[in-house]
Image (cartoon, helix red, strand yellow):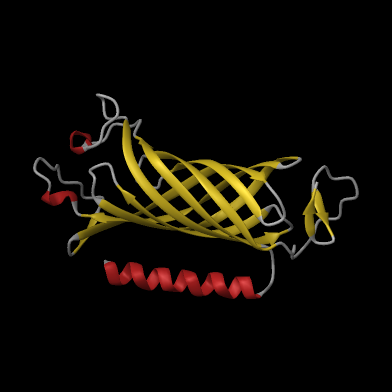
């Protein structure tokens, strides 16, 4: 499992670097998370540790996410790759690899709202060694780890601070199966050059001389 994850990660990094060299608009983002929300019934919810509430819906699950985005159309549509590391609901080390697309849906001056969706590869230290574990055949074992494929979606708010720096807040569904998490992040613009700029003479927030200017 670890070798497979490493190969996928290296491949993602190569693709990201290649895209950056094309000098189109791209970003690098770091997200922090501390809370996992499990609103759906799960067969192994009795194993959840670090519960905040008695029912095990809110779990302390600290995590770190690294995200790269490269815009394909104007400054509104991009593809992105994400790598995350978490302490999961059972306090086991877990990771995910995500590849998807992102579309901006609202832009008001320095504020924007975007929606993101794509495929996800989950990996975690096997739960089968935990006393009381109920077998879940949706996971595939690989040594001491287990993995499965899934879908990740995200709703992200961004506040543009200046030409190269943003602050973000987001809610993610699917960093673990059937789980929501909330993140706060910092985004750095590696390149602010728009590959295919949209013609607009009276936009409320647009690029002037290829740089953001409200």
* Above or below 188: residue 133: above
Residue 189 location in percent, x, y? 64, 59
Please identify the residue farthest to the left as the structure is shown.
131
Q: Quarter holding the N terminus?
A: bottom left
Q: Residue at x 41, y 52 (%)?
A: 64
In the foreground, 207 or 119:
207
Residue 33 location in percent, x, y? 42, 44
Residue 6 location in percent, x, y? 35, 70
In the foreground, 214 or 80:
214
Q: Residue at x 50, y 75 (%)?
A: 14
Identify the image quadrant of residue 58: top left
Please identify the residue farthest to the top as the structure is shown.
54
* Above or below 182: residue 20: below
* Above or below 150: residue 15: below
Left or right of 179 on screen, residue 185: right
Identify the image quadrant of residue 159: top right
Q: Residue at x 36, y 38 (%)?
A: 36
Residue 87 location in percent, x, y? 29, 48
Say how many tags the image has. 0
């Amino acid at each position: 499992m670890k070798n497979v994850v490493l190969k996928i990660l290296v491949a993602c990094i190569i693709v990201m670097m290649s895209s950056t060299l094309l000098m189109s608009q791209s970003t690098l983002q770091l997200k922090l998370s501390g809370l996992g929300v499990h609103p759906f019934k799960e067969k192994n919810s009795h194993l959840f540790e670090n519960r905040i509430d008695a029912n095990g819906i809110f779990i302390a699950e600290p995590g770190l996410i690294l995200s790269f985005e490269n815009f394909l159309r104007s400054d509104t549509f991009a593809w992105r790759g994400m790598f995350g590391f978490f302490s999961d609901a059972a306090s086991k080390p877990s990771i995910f690899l995500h590849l998807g697309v992102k579309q901006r849906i609202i832009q008001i001056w320095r504020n924007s709202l975007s929606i993101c969706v794509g495929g996800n590869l989950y990996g975690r230290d096997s739960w089968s060694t935990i006393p009381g574990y109920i077998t879940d055949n949706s996971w595939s074992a690989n040594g001491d780890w287990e993995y499965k494929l899934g879908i990740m979606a995200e709703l992200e708010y961004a506040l543009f601070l200046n030409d190269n720096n943003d602050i973000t807040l987001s809610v993610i569904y699917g960093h673990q199966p059937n789980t929501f998490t909330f993140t706060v992040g910092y985004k750095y613009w590696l390149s602010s050059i728009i590959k295919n700029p949209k013609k607009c003479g009276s936009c409320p927030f647009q690029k002037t001389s290829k740089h953001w200017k409200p």
